[in-house]
Amino acid sequence: MEAAARLKAGRLPFWTLTICAGAVLIFLSSILESILIFDRTAIAHGEIWRLVTGNLVHFSALHLAYDLSVLFVAGAIIEIRGYRYYPVLCLTAALFIGIVLYRAEPDMLYFAGLSGVATAAIVYLCLHGLTEKGAWRWVCAAALFGLGIKFGIELTFNESLLFATGSREFLPAPLSHLVGAVTALFLFALSRLRERNSLQIRPAQ
Amino acid sequence: MKRTIPAVSISILVALLTVTVVNGCATGQTRHATSTVDYLYPNTKDPIVTPGIPVLTLPMRVGIAFVPGDGGGNYGRGLMAVRNQRFILTEKKKMDLMQEVANHFKKYAYVKDIELIPSAYLTPRGSFANLDQLRTMYGVDVVALLSYDQVQFTDEGILSFTYWTIIGAYVVPGERNDTHTMLDAVVYDIKSRKMLFRAPGTHHIKGKATLVNLSEKLRANSEEGFNEAAKGMITNLDQQLAVFKEKVKERPAEYKVVHSPSYSGGGNIDLIGSAMTLVLGGFFLWKRRRA
């Protein structure tokens, strides 16, 4: 019932559109790209915003297209269904991805791409889907199962299953996907905990 | 009758030869070996190639190859030369071992590609001219040259043999039916002719075979020897790689590191991720229309 009510609201996926527009804008501007890309040397010299903004930069049109298509679909569904904390999810996922890659991949000089954030959005969407009824729940469960296998293979071989961008203009960073997924899991758990606490407080009032 | 000095000398020589031949037939030792030294520096006892300063462009394209032996890389004497003619390290086995090494090093971000180079592309005593050809053919900057030395004894008493590696010789004592194996990986920057690092892997199997199943047992030991030596070599390669990375940082005058534009990590969605999202999106839309 609640989900149906949310759907009828027909809200515009504001945050998703903003992020996608931002990524396109950065891709079109080489100046913005150079200011915002995850650049290890620049970060070490204090330009710490790059830890977050690096996620918005892309190396090629195909790279951008794949990442945006996934983020757009997952993000739009999240916003249309009215799941909470989506902007917080995007921001924390981007931040954690930047920090973890900076610490764990010392050989990686540059990083770019929204796929970690997009993965966070898919996982967050599917986790919420598990709490709902009907076929949607099973579709989400299957997607989570598939993602779990994908992460396992990616991390074992440090390689994407089917490298979508065609050329090897950069090395894949599967760790960013894992960080995105873990962030989504934590945020989902926190949001559920908070909802449960508020439900427990309400009868007492 | 007086014996002359030449006659005595000839008699002694004949006696010595007879002892050697008889001993050679009664005992046995099979050795299969190739040498990186012979391959790279074939015409000189002391290597005189002056290496330059290597410029390592990251991520690197690395080649792996077994160096060829002079005459097929094996020789033996005595019984074993006949018994163990079917050497275990076939071309397929070599490719498998190289694949094992390659799988281990694919995980490093500074390794872009690893090419397994079949033995047919390496000329015996081909030296750096041959490596230059491989560099052009495969587009590799750095090559890991693998050589091996395996000895199997079927003799009583104290025996020994010598492993010749790029940095010198190891003398290893042997006993009856022992199998000694060494795999040696030497990593070279082809353009500068500079050896970056090396890592050996050795393994020793104490022989327990009886004459009944000697041939089969020695063959099994030979295979086990190579497998275990390969494991040791991979572990050593890991350690030497870590040491080399530190060395590069500490001695920038000796090693130059250049990062190619592709030395970047990308958060990329693959086809499976895209397909999964499309299914989710499609189902969501379908459900929404029905609602």
Image (tube, rainbow, N blue to C red):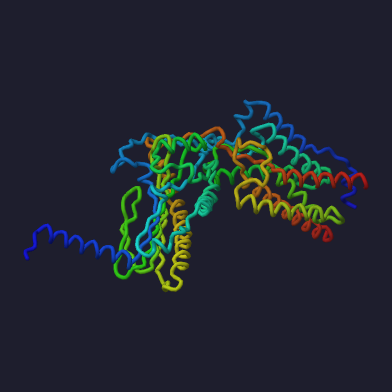
B67 or B210, nearer to the observer: B210
B84 or A163, nearer to the observer: B84
Whole-percent x, y for residue B120 in the image? 49, 44
**Residue A88 seen anywhere in this rendered image of the structure:** no
Whether residue A27 is situated above or below residue B282 in the rendered picture: above
Whole-percent x, y for residue B280 in the image? 80, 47
Whether residue B16 is situated above or below residue A74 in the rendered picture: below
> Where the C terminus of chain A falls, by quadrant?
bottom right
Whole-percent x, y for residue A200 in the image? 80, 60
Residue sticking out furthest to the right: B290
The residue drawn where x is 73% and y is 37% is: A68
What is the quadrant of residue A165 in the picture? top right
Image side of residue B187 versus residue A197, left or right: left
B107 or B229, nearer to the observer: B229
B265 or A84, nearer to the observer: B265
The residue drawn where x is 65% and y is 41% is: B267
How many marks can you see? 0
The residue drawn where x is 74% and y is 35% is: A20
Image side of residue B231 versus residue A11, left or right: left
**Residue B148 seen anywhere in this rendered image of the structure:** yes
Whole-percent x, y for residue A38 in the image? 59, 36
What is the quadrant of residue A170 in the picture? top right
Image side of residue B3 versus residue A141, left or right: left
Residue sticking out furthest to the left: B2
The residue drawn where x is 63% and y is 36% is: A167
